[in-house]
Amino acid sequence: MSESEASGARPFRVIAVANQKGGVGKTTTAINLATALAAAGEKTLLIDLDPQGNASTGLGLPRQARRHGSYALLLGNDQAATLCQPTAVPDLSLIPAEDDLAGAEIELVGLPRREFRLRDSLSALTAHAIVLIDCPPGLNLLTLNALVAADAVLVPLQCEFLALEGISQIIRTIEMVRRGFNPGLRLQGIVLTMFDRRNNLSELVAADARGFFGTQVYETVIPRNIRISEAPSHGKPVLLYDFRSPGAQAYIKLAGELLKREREPRTIPA
Ligand SMILES: Nc1ncnc2c1ncn2[C@@H]1O[C@H](COP(=O)(O)OP(=O)(O)O)[C@@H](O)[C@H]1O
Ligand SMILES: [Mg+2]
């Protein structure tokens, strides 16, 4: 595939969950949104693109089952379809992060089409409707591969001091990727995470974000919820760990809102 074909129509939608800051809820959102989308009947693939492998752990995939994953996707000639593994969630597959992924960034530097490796490996995918990519923190070559492979970027925004400053950086990165590599890339939306009703700062950040980004901020807000943070140590998405918890219910609502957005006619990208 040539660079000019990079924005051609594909039978699936790729959404990168990205924010250069660590600890803002990227992995938590990737795991639980993927689960909720699968539960809504969408054939979903989650790609763990973070060498820390937290999404693979959170979905209960033991280390010995992670030998072939996103490193093979980026550095080998493996197509995504051959690397998908089933999870405990029906209709949700995973391409895990194997240990080698930690060195991938450096190895990528010398390769041809280094920014397009992930996009190229997804080109023959047919069994999935939605692909979510859990990005590492930082704006490195792994994140760049995700943004070049993606149709849209979902940005988790933690409701904390200086949150908006961080978001302007990812917005600028999206614009840079659009100009240089992937003209069709759009901001899919911003999701407020770890919202704490008892904390005025959460309300302030939410109001600021909505004032600035308007309807690009999802109505659904993910509350700070202990069940969400407990679930990964049981190797389960919160929807399987405690379906009734406010965290699980929020991710179900978010999936509904996302599907509604994805089915609406396109508005001009931000
Ligand atoms: N809504 C939430 N409520 C409580 N804890 C959360 C919530 N979202 C994320 N966390 C916790 O915050 C930490 C960072 O989240 P994570 O999703 O790993 O962020 P990132 O992938 O952006 O680094 C994790 O320990 C996670 O369990
Ligand atoms: Mg993470």
Image (cartoon, rainbow, N blue to C red):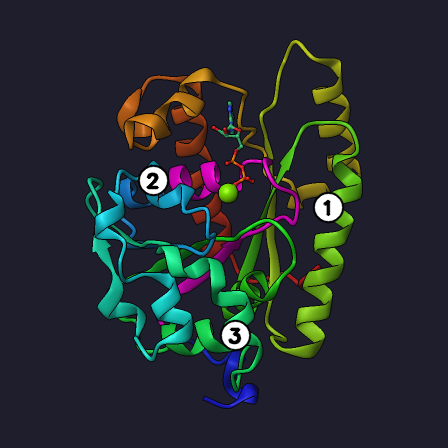
Residue bearing mark 3: 108
Q: Amino acid at mark 1?
A: Ile
What are the residue bounds of the magenta stretch?
A: 10-33
Residue 57: which numbered mark, if any? 2
Question: Relative to the observer, which residue lies in front, 170 or 263?
Answer: 170
Q: Quadrant of the C terminus?
A: bottom right
Residue labelled 1 has its Cβ within 8 Å of some atom of ligand 1: no
Question: Relative to the observer, which residue lies in front, 241 or 265?
Answer: 241
> Which of pointers 3 and 1 indicates the residue nearer the eye?
3
Spatial separation of the CA atoms under disc 2 and disc 1: 27 Å
Tell me the element at label 2. Answer: helix
Residue bearing mark 1: 167
Q: Amino acid at mark 2?
A: Thr
Spatial separation of the CA atoms under disc 2 and disc 3: 25 Å
Position above or below: 28 against 197: below
Residue 66: tell me if it is visible.
yes
- Report x, y in % for residue 178: 67, 71
Spatial separation of the CA atoms under disc 3 and disc 1: 27 Å
Q: Amino acid at mark 3?
A: Leu
Q: Which callout, 3 or 1, points at the residue further toward the start of the chain?
A: 3
Tell me the element at label 1. Answer: helix
Residue 52 lies within the magenta run: no
Residue 61: which numbered mark, if any? none
- Report x, y in % for residue 19: 63, 48
Please tell me how crowded label 2 is: few (under 14), some (14-19), or many (20+) other residues with Cα within 10 Å.
many
Residue labelled 3 has its Cβ within 8 Å of some atom of ligand 2: no
The residue at the point 33 percent across, 54 percent down is 96
Position above or below: 237 against 97: above
Residue labelled 2 has its Cβ within 8 Å of some atom of ligand 1: no
Tell me the element at label 3. Answer: helix
In the picture, measured across the screen, residue 228 lies left or right of residue 155, that is: left
In the picture, measured across the screen, residue 250 lies left or right of residue 141, that is: left
